[in-house]
Image (tube, grey):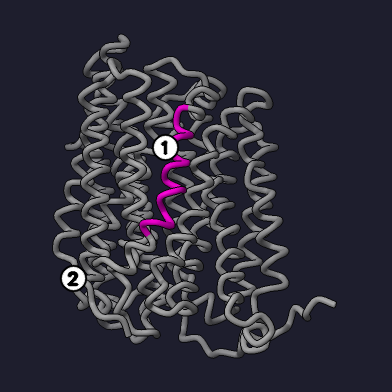
Amino acid sequence: MFFQRTASLDELTSRFGGRYKWMVLFTLAFGSVASVLSTTSFNVAIPTLMREFALGQDKIQWAITGFMAAMTISMLPTPWLLDRFGFRRCFIGTIMLLAAASIAGSLTTQFSFLVVTRILQGTAAGLLQPFGTLAVMRLFPAEIQGRALGILSFSVVLAPAVAPTLGGLLLDHFGWEAIFLINLPMCLVAGVAAFYLLPQAEAMKPSPFDWAGVALLGIATLSSVESVASLHDSGLWSWRTGIFITISLSAFLLFALHARRSAHPIVKLELFADRAFAMGTLVSLAYGFGIYASTYLIPVFLQNVLGFSATAAGLTLLPAGLTLAAMLPITGHMADRTPPRLIAMCGLSLFCLSFMLFAMMGMRISYAELIGFTVLGRIGLAMILPSLTLAALRGMEHHQLPQSSMAISYVRQLGGVFGVAISAVFLEWRTLENGSTLSGISSAYSETFMLLAAAFGFALIAAGQMKRKPAH
């Protein structure tokens, strides 16, 4: 007979021995895959949604940025929620929210309600983000943390590898509504496994919840996104854009002042006294900008400029995704034997190079070059994923891990919000400037790809300032 669902961590560890931490890792990986599928599979539906709801790039991107803004903000209370309700309840409850929002999204007929369901999906995905990293840093010894993060990343990026292809097939045969349902099998597997494998939470007394801190960071995040969208509608020097930029900067400044004075801030500023962590947050910000903008732009570029169908676009990206998945266990093992900072720098260089090549070739790109450039970028991404986390978090104190892992995820997602919003608005602006001919549209995409290359160049500079600290 299977074990009781109320088993404690010590009981489960005793029952399963050394393999228990790997079982937990794969359980959390299924949940991460479900959240990632909610993001990556949706991108291939953007051209269809533009036609279905008669909206432009600047409006349709709210289905993406709404998801990502919610994903970013919802990460903030994760450490407090873990203390208040425990790992098990938080994970299972979040999986249930993700599944419910996905089903509701498949039934919508209004774009406004579609955005609402995307926001709910993003909320669940944001809560799920720090779980895997936190489990690795707590359950695994330092000498195999890179390998564990590589395997965790492998499961997460395998979803984007197959999501464009699977999403394209579902879109072409069943319509955009089917895209919302793509993550339900993973939600089911993760929920059932968590019910049996995650331990019952121990009684804890969490510190008071930092409502003011979460409110300030939430206002800063939302106003930042709105200020980017206002650049397209009203221009840089309009009062509307100025107001949102002022609100955003003021909210971030007020949060910094609040965090210095509060006894229990949602993010303690003392974390940034660690140089590797501080530089790691800058790398994560720029990296999030580039990676999320690229997953938004490349499928749209293949369809709008090169004339691919949704299925063909997904198949074109499949080799790069499979390469990424295959490389991650290797680069995770490398991160245990080589300074993670150096591996991250090499990966950022390759990613930057791939987008420079996209920008230079434009619509003249051949099919072989298209495959090669995307594969090159994904090799770089495989080097970044496990090494950046280790370089930033290895050496942090045990009690700092919940907030530090959440903070790294938050700034990465904040960069992603900026990346999708800025690239969509920038692309719309450059298309208007260059003309609506195929050549003009291609030039607009080339200029946007160069913008992404600049973001990875900035991340490379910040990564050079990271110093690996000895593991505790």
Amino acid type, label 1: Ala
Query: Where does label 1 land, which residue?
Result: 320
Location of residue 272 by image quarter? bottom left
- The image shows residue 140 at horizontal and vertical percentages of 46, 77
Is residue 84 covered in magenta?
no
Query: Which residue is found at the position 49% from the left and 61% from the top?
Result: 152
> Of circles 2 and 1, which is in front?
1
Question: Is residue 19 at all visible to an observer of this figure?
Answer: yes
Asked if residue 41 is positioned above or below residue 121 in the image, the reply reads: above
Of residues 211 and 93, which is closer to you in this image? 93
For disc 2, the marked residue is: 467
| Label 2 Cα neighbours within 10 Å, binned few <14 / some 14-19 / many ≥20 | some
Please state which amino acid type lies under the numbered disc 2: Lys
x and y, in percent, of residue 92 in the image: 65, 66
The answer to whether residue 120 shows anywhere in this view is no
| Figure quadrant of residue 253 | bottom left
Quadrant of the drawing holding the N terminus? bottom right
Place of residue 130 in the rendered image (x, y in percent of width and height, measured from the top left): 46, 66
Residue at figure coordinates x 52%, y 54% from the top left: 155
Q: Secondary structure at mark 1?
A: helix
- Seen from the viewer's position, the closer of residues 278 and 119 is 278
Q: Give the Cα separation between the discs numbered 2 and 1.
A: 30 Å
Q: Main secondary structure of the magenta part?
A: helix
Region of the chain picked out in magenta, as a range: 316-331
* 13 on left or right of 305: right
**Relative vertical location of residue 162 with respect to residue 251 in this rendering, above or below:** above
Q: Is residue 319 magenta-colored?
A: yes
Identified at 21% across, 46% down, the residue is 349
